[in-house]
Image: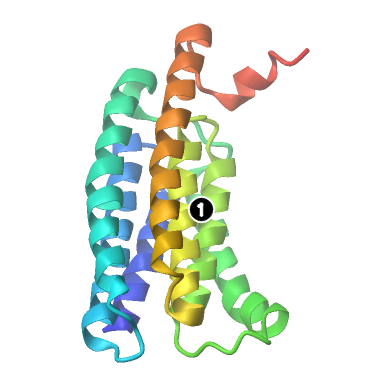
Amino acid sequence: MIGYLTLVFLITGLLMLGGRAVSRSIALLAAQSLVLSMIAFYLGLWDAKASWHMLVVGGLTLVIKVIVLPWILYRLADRVVKYHEVPLSIGPGLSMLTGVLLVGLTYSYVVPVLLKEVQVGGQMFPVALSAVLLGCFFMISRRSAFNQLIGIVMMENGLFLCAIAINGGMPLILELGIFFDLLVGVLVMGVFTNRIRGTFDTLDTKVLNKLKG
């Protein structure tokens, strides 16, 4: 079951690289977060090594990342994103190809060579690291500042899955703090994005870079 869920988790990350529409990216991000919530619920219910707090984390993930954050991002996108599409630094096809190469690099070199000391079985760990790299690439392959918000949440999903893969998650108090920081961070960045859009009438980072000194 975990293998199928992690596969869907990885596929949603790759699909996010293949489109311009903001609504599509937010929907895929919510789907990825839903899969992450299902993984936490599954471990909390069926894995004897996982503690009960995985159920709490799964519930928080469901409420915050699947419901609250997508709602905030949709509302913000309606205000600040023109035409509900974002300019890309590279084309969708090349972007997805790069994502596949990053996944291949993670499986063939990063995990077995660079991180060979980390003794973790199964596919959860390489999938989690792949999600972090895909989130980082998502941020730099889009020229809209709005996508920094989506990329950050995507990377956080990967980091959270890394923590689950390595030691069954972090202490509950730390995870609660991370959820709170993530929610506040997105809200603050949303305010700044709205102000940038209102002041310069664009979120295109290529245009904004021309405003330097």
- Asked whether, in this view, residue 72 is left or right of residue 213, the answer is left
Where residue 173 appears, x then y in whole percent? 41, 61
Say what amino acid the circle numbered 1 marks: Gly
- Report which residue position mark 1 lands on: 135
| Residue 161 or residue 21, whichever sits in front | 161
- Asked whether, in this view, residue 111 is left or right of residue 76, the answer is right
| Residue 31 or residue 152, whichever sits in front | 152
Where residue 68 appears, x then y in whole percent? 25, 42
Mark 1 neighbour class, 10 Å CA radius: few under 14, some 14 to 19, many 20 or more: many
| Residue 68 or residue 3, whichever sits in front | 68
Describe the element under mark 1 as helix, strand or loop.
helix
Where residue 168 appears, x then y in whole percent? 42, 79
Residue at (31% x, 64% y) in the render:
57
Quarter of the image containing the N terminus? bottom left
Measured along the vertical axis of the image, is residue 106 above or below residue 74? below
Residue at (54% x, 23% y) in the render:
204
Query: Can residue 94 be seen at all in this image of the molecule?
Result: no
Measured along the vertical axis of the image, is residue 34 above or below residue 205? below
Total marks in image: 1
Quarter of the image containing the C terminus? top right
Query: Can residue 42 be seen at all in this image of the molecule?
Result: yes
Seen from this angle, which residue lies furthest front?
173
Residue at (34% x, 22% y) in the render:
83
Where residue 157 appears, x then y in whole percent? 42, 59
Residue at (70% x, 16% y) in the render:
210
